[in-house]
Each structure stands twice: as structure tokens, then as C-alpha cells.
Amino acid sequence: MKKIIIALTIWFCLCSPCFASIDENAIHDNYLCNLSFTTRSFNDIITQINNLAEKSTEISYIQYYWHSDGSKIDWDIEINWRPSVKILTGQQLTKSDQQIKEAAENIVNSIDKTNDYQTIYEIYNWIQDKTEYDYISAEQKRYRYQNLPCDNAGGVFFDGKAVCGGYADAFYLLSNMAGIDCFLVIGGNHCWNIVKLQDKWYYIDVTDENGHCFLRGSDWLEEYGYVIESYMPIEASKTDYMF
């Protein structure tokens, strides 16, 4: 099946280069927006996605997928940014954003930051110790396409309860505030993180209460069924972090 998908992708790349650019003016300061356009060039769309991510510092992740009705391919681009991104990029903050920022600063100031590994470890443990999974919101899917606390760092900081998006967003905000490069990763209705340590990138899933996904490489991720659907501006280490 994988070979078939690759073959189809190559075929579409070689077909008509007709291409509709992403309209950056269509992106507004809201929680999530969708952009749809038509193309037969896989390379062109990836280039546009890359350019958009580099220009738009508000974006915390870009998720994209395509489907075809036989005559055309529709690319659906899902762009999501959160209060944490506004905080990190110094944009104008609402009262709620400011409260999240102050809470994050207090947490970062309270942890042991002896080195990068210790910083990552402390943030990971702080979130896991202070947060319970919000099963009710997850079952009702009421957080989808809305800026609700359970799906961002505010749920972790103020409610002690969140879905995976909240866990990952809190880790994303705290890590970057502490000087650790970190991104959100999206795939298979799940959200986790990729973090930089000693010039390599590793995956962390703070939602996993058993602690199985801590500084893991892409080989481990694939073995345990994680599927990445979001735009990844960097490449992860294939192997786990060596302690």
C-alpha cells in the first residue's frame, strides 16, 4: 500500500503544474483556519507550506492532506495557533494570554535548569504531576476547533486538566520560554512534541502517563504506531536519546 501511495505521489508531481498559491491574507488571528486550493504538484504545495511557516511566526503547526475526485486534487491546509505562540512571539496579548504567560514564567523560574536535559526533564515531570487527562472533553470532542482551556496550556496551568493538545501546548510554551527549541506534532487525532537536545531532535509525549515516550527517535515512534500528519520543519533523530 505504501508503494502505491508513493507511486501516485510521483505521478501527480509529474502531471500538470497548475497551482493556486496560499492566500496569506486569508489567515486571521483565530484558533484554527482552513485553506483549500487545487494543485497537481506535490512539490509546489510543500514549497508553499514551507514558505508560509517561515513567514508566519504565529503558526504552531500546519497540518495538510489531500483527496481527489478523479479530476482534481483538493489540498486542505489546517493552520493552528494558540495563545502560547502569541506569547512567545511578543504579540499583543489579551488578559487571558497574559495570565497564561505569567503562570508559565513562574513555573520556568521554579524548576532546575542546570542543563538542557534537566530543564526538559523538569518541565515534563511538572506537567505530568500537575495534570489529569480530561476524559469528558475528549469523549465529547467539544474542544475541537475552539480555543478552550483543555486544549491549550491554560487548562494545565489553571485547571490541572487537559486533553493531549493542552499537555503538548504547555510543554511547548514552557520549553521555549526556558530556551529549549520545541514544536507541536500532530497526527492520528493526537498531539505531542518534538524537542531539541544536544543538536538532535527527539519526540516527547507528555500525555503518556507511563512515560514511554520521552526523548524517543523516529524508529521508536514508527514502531509504536505514531502517525505524523503535521508540517515538520526539522528532522528527528532515528534513534532514542542516549542517557
Image (cartoon, helix red, strand yellow):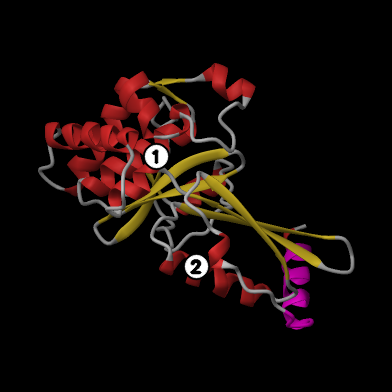
Q: Is residue 36 left or right of residue 158?
A: right
Residue that mark 1 sits on: 169
Label annotation for residue 138: none
In-front residue for pair 232/101: 101
Residue 154 found in image quarter = top left
**Depicted 126 relative to depicted 118: above or below:** above
**Quadrant where the image shows the N terminus:** bottom right
Mark 2 and mark 1 lie on one chain; the one further toward the N terminus is 2
Residue range highlighted in magenta:
3-18
> Residue at the top extreme?
136
Q: Is residue 13 left or right of residue 86?
A: right
Q: Measured from the top left, where is residue 46 in percent x and y?
A: 58, 70
Q: Is residue 9 magenta?
A: yes
Q: Measured from the top left, where is residue 51 in percent x and y?
A: 49, 72
Q: Element at badge 1?
A: helix
The residue drawn where x is 51% and y is 54% is 28
Residue that mark 2 sits on: 52
Q: Measured from the top left, where is residue 120 in percent x and y?
A: 25, 42
